[in-house]
């Protein structure tokens, strides 16, 4: 049944070129089934592919072709395309990694196929949930065993190119499936792999100077688990070492200390609360080094004076934030602090709980919690009445003097936590 399904799907994938022979050998990784496929006319190897079904009626196929490109296929009886029509597929992986793929309809209706660039393929490999938007319709996919699947497909393609289709065998991922392929004998390669020591890697966030005595505030989760030095970089300046003075995990706040005299300018906290509908500016370092080395500036409004489940310690804001914005200043139109950027809505949990895709729901810690934290830490700070409205560019320029990129190394276990 599975082999018939896979053959039908791959026939659809490449119907125009008659790449229909197969499957030869087999692939079994979690819920994915597939094998090796060839060009029916020439017998030449075309790709290794595997397919899985979803209750919605959509079938997804992932393939590694003879030129080592990754192919991505969606087929659904309800699709209505013209043959060879170009289809845009907007993909969101784990609520963080957004990509736009350009696909082609392989038949008049049921299927489209696209090439996944390497960066997208790497994100797909690690993802556990995907949302794909196709011609105004949104489809949701729980991804299972993609790490093992893509490893097996790559091994399959390499071995078939080296040894020929007639040597195609069982390429199943025994680790993912928890079983040995039938007829295989245990050998050294199937022995348990010794656990590897945890590796350290870089973690980044944002913070801002709150006193000219060298105090910096950020989210506690930005520096939680840091090993070695914590560094702070004002834009365009050399990094300085920061010492963690205290942390408040309940309110997700941390106080850092630089040598006195390091900073000449500190942020000023607005002395009056904001209101729903007030305009705000968020500044921070999202995806540092991937998007830009400079900080980014986003604007929005205060959507609500409480956060998730009516948590009154938070503001809900529409200013877009991403991983790395955490700990950054949220400013009013006069350039004064009205909060600290803390998080965006947990995309996966929200979708699984409601079945709906959230859009641009973000949270910031209110200044009341920040001021209580600073008071308890005996740190002096400046407050002021709301000022006249400034241009966003002027607010951003002033924030350069006190907004820092925060970076440190963490272990793999700690770094896997949500930022």
Image: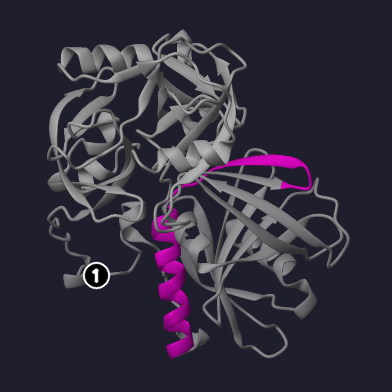
Q: Is residue 14 left or right of residue 316?
A: right
Q: Which residues are magenta?
A: 134-162
The residue singled out by tag 1 in the image is 185
Image spot of residue 37 (x, y percent): 60, 76
Image spot of residue 256 (x, y percent): 18, 33
Q: Is residue 28 left or right of residue 5?
A: left
Residue 165 in view (yes/no): yes
Q: 271 or 404: which is nearer to us?
A: 271
Q: Is residue 325 left or right of residue 185?
A: right
The answer to whether residue 341 is magenta is: no
Q: Sort mark 1 into few (<14), some (14-19) or many (20+) by Cα contacts within 10 Å.
A: few
- Give the structural element (helix, strand or loop) at label 1: loop
Which image quarter holds the N terminus?
A: bottom right
Residue shown at the point (47%, 10%) measured from the top left:
273
Above-or-below relation of 120 to 221: below
Above-or-below relation of 71 to 363: below
Above-or-below relation of 177 to 352: below
The answer to whether residue 149 is magenta is: yes
Which image quarter holds the C terminus?
A: top left
Image spot of residue 334 (x, y percent): 52, 25
Q: 55 or 129: which is nearer to us?
A: 129
- The image's colour scheme reads one colour
Residue shown at the point (64%, 56%) measured from the top left:
100
Q: Quadrant of residue 402?
A: top left
Image spot of residue 245 (x, y percent): 12, 29
Q: Is residue 104 left or right of residue 378?
A: right
Residue shown at the point (48%, 46%) measured from the top left:
296
């Amino acid at each position: 049944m599975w082999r018939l399904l896979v053959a039908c799907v791959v026939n659809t994938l490449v119907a125009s070129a008659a790449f229909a022979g197969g499957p030869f050998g087999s692939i079994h990784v979690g819920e994915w089934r597939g094998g090796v496929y060839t060009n029916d006319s020439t017998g030449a190897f075309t790709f290794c592919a595997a397919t899985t079904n979803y209750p919605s009626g959509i079938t997804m196929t992932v393939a590694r072709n003879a030129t080592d490109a990754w192919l991505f296929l969606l087929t659904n009886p309800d699709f209505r395309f013209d043959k060879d029509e170009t289809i845009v597929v907007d993909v969101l992986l784990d609520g963080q990694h957004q990509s736009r793929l350009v696909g082609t309809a392989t038949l008049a209706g049921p299927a489209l196929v696209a090439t996944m660039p390497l960066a997208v393929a790497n994100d797909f490999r690690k993802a556990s949930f995907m949302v794909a938007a196709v011609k105004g319709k949104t489809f949701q996919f729980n991804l299972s065993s993609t790490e093992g699947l893509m490893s097996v497909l790559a091994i399959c393609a390499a071995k078939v190119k080296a040894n020929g289709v007639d040597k195609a065998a069982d390429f199943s991922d025994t680790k993912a499936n928890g079983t040995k392929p039938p007829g295989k004998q245990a050998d050294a390669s199937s022995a348990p792999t010794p656990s590897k020591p945890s590796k350290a890697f870089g973690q980044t966030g944002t913070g801002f100077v709150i006193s000219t005595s060298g105090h910096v505030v950020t989210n506690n989760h930005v520096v939680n688990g840091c090993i070695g030095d914590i560094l702070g970089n004002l834009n365009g300046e050399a990094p300085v070492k920061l010492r963690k003075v205290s942390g408040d995990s309940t309110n997700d706040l941390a106080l850092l200390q630089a040598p006195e005299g390091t900073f000449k300018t500190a942020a000023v906290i607005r002395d009056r609360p904001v209101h729903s509908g007030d305009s705000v500016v968020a500044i921070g370092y999202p995806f540092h080094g991937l998007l830009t080395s400079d900080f980014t500036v986003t604007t929005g409004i205060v959507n609500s004076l409480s956060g998730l489940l009516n948590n009154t310690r938070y503001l809900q804001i529409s200013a877009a934030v991403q991983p790395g914005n955490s700990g950054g200043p949220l400013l009013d139109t006069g350039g004064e602090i009205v909060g600290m950027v803390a998080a965006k809505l947990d995309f996966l949990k929200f979708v699984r709980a409601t079945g709906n895709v959230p859009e641009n729901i973000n949270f910031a810690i209110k200044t009341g919690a920040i001021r209580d934290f600073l008071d308890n830490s005996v740190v002096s700070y400046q407050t002021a009445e709301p000022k006249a409205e400034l241009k966003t560019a002027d607010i951003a320029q002033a924030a350069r003097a006190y907004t820092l990129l925060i970076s440190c190394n963490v272990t793999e276990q700690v770094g896997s936590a949500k930022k």
